[in-house]
Image (cartoon, grey):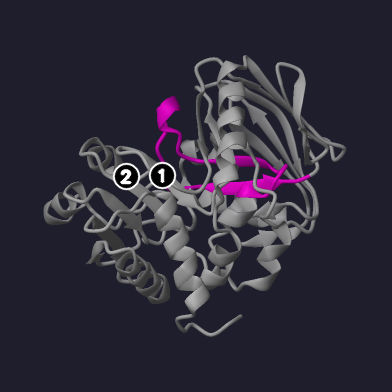
Amino acid sequence: MRDDRIEPQWIEAFEAVLRLCKAQPGEVVCLLAESQSRPLNIDLAELAAHRLGCRPFRLVVPTPRQSAPVPVRSTGASRALQGHPAALAALKASSLVLDLTLEGLLHAPELKEILSAGARILMVSNEHPEALERLVPRPEDEAPVKAAVKRTRAAKSMTVTSAAGTDLTVDMAGAVTAGVWGWTDRPGTIAHWPGGVVVSFPRAGTVNGTLVLAPGDVNLTFKRTIESPVRLTLVDDHVTAIEGTGPDAIVMRDYLAAWGDRAAYAVSHVGWGLNPRARREALMFYGPRDTNGTELRAAAGNFLFSTGANEFAGRFTEGHFDIPVFGCTIALDGEPVVLEGRLVP
């Protein structure tokens, strides 16, 4: 890992993304962070904003006390704001917010209020800037994601199969689908960097079948590559069985049981990665403190399966797994969009 010092290419990476977000000279840019945020990324964001003539300011709130019975990672539901009225006022007064919190505002309870004020929010994933530099979004990344979103919203069903034994069916009726290409340039919208993914939040009781995790798949909550097979049985979008004798199955069973919450076993979202520059082996190059794993979520052709909170199905919990599964065939209404882990043109 490179040293945590400011490098010119990292400032340029942040500047490139701010340009895609249409940051303007004189624009007020809020750098939202918490006491445990990565200081280097805050500095880089501030310097890049100054280079574009913006008026950045730092809003740093305390990292909250832990309230869960087990460690919480990569939920996209930051608890840092705690409904703080002064912090919310500052965020709503900013036209552009760079979200540098540990977990991000994507599922935070305050998000709707901030977006309704007209702010556009870019979640800068809690990655080492070396990873962000490799995954600076490009203008041509937008069209494939938008096309995937349009196609998914029109679908009535999604099926996922694999040679490892996966056979999953998702009823897409009423599912809420969104896509991220790596930047946001419209008021009242949110995106994250790295980008390149489409996800759907199914309605309650619409996911059934079997998902088999094979060696080489990844449990991003644990920042761990799967080494031993895990077989998940899903009934009415809840995991009802976790089979396997290896450490991967054992720790998954223990972690979910620790919540004492049925919603932790439920499906949060399903989707697939579209970013050809994102690499699953990148996990091998970063320590757990230096990666949030967003790159693997976006890796082209992975089936992204997540458990936990799904507000569109009326379920709320801090328990959360994000699991990129590789080598799957994903079909919408019987037509493959991913074939054995490769994007269908």
Which corner quadrant of the image does residue 290 belong to? bottom right
Instruction: Please give the label number shown on residue 143.
Output: none
Could you say whether the residue bearing mark 1 is in a helix, strand or loop? Answer: loop
Which amino acid, mark 1?
Thr
Instruction: Please give the label number shown on residue 184.
Output: 1
Label pair 1/2, CB-CB below 8 angstroms: yes
Q: Quadrant of the N terminus?
A: bottom right
Q: Quadrant of the C terminus?
A: top right
- Residue at 45% from the left image edge and 56% from the top image edge: 17
Q: Position of residue 30 (x, y in %)?
A: 25, 58
Q: Position of residue 71 (x, y in %)?
A: 47, 61
The residue segment tinted magenta is: 298-326
- Residue at 56% from the left image edge and 28% from the top image edge: 149
Position of 89 with respect to 236 (left or right) is left
Could you say whether the residue bearing mark 2 is in a helix, strand or loop? Answer: strand
Observer able to see residue 268: yes
- Residue at 53% from the left image edge and 43% from the top image edge: 181
Location of residue 39 with respect to 116 vertically, above or below: below
Please check the rendered image and state whether residue 312 is part of the magenta-colored stretch, yes or no: yes
Position of 316 with respect to 227 (left or right) is left
What residue is disc 2 on? 120
The residue furthest right is: 163
Position of 328 with respect to 108 (left or right) is right
Observer able to see residue 64: no
Please check the rendered image and state whether residue 322 is part of the magenta-colored stretch, yes or no: yes
Which amino acid, mark 2?
Arg
Position of 159 with respect to 42 (left or right) is right
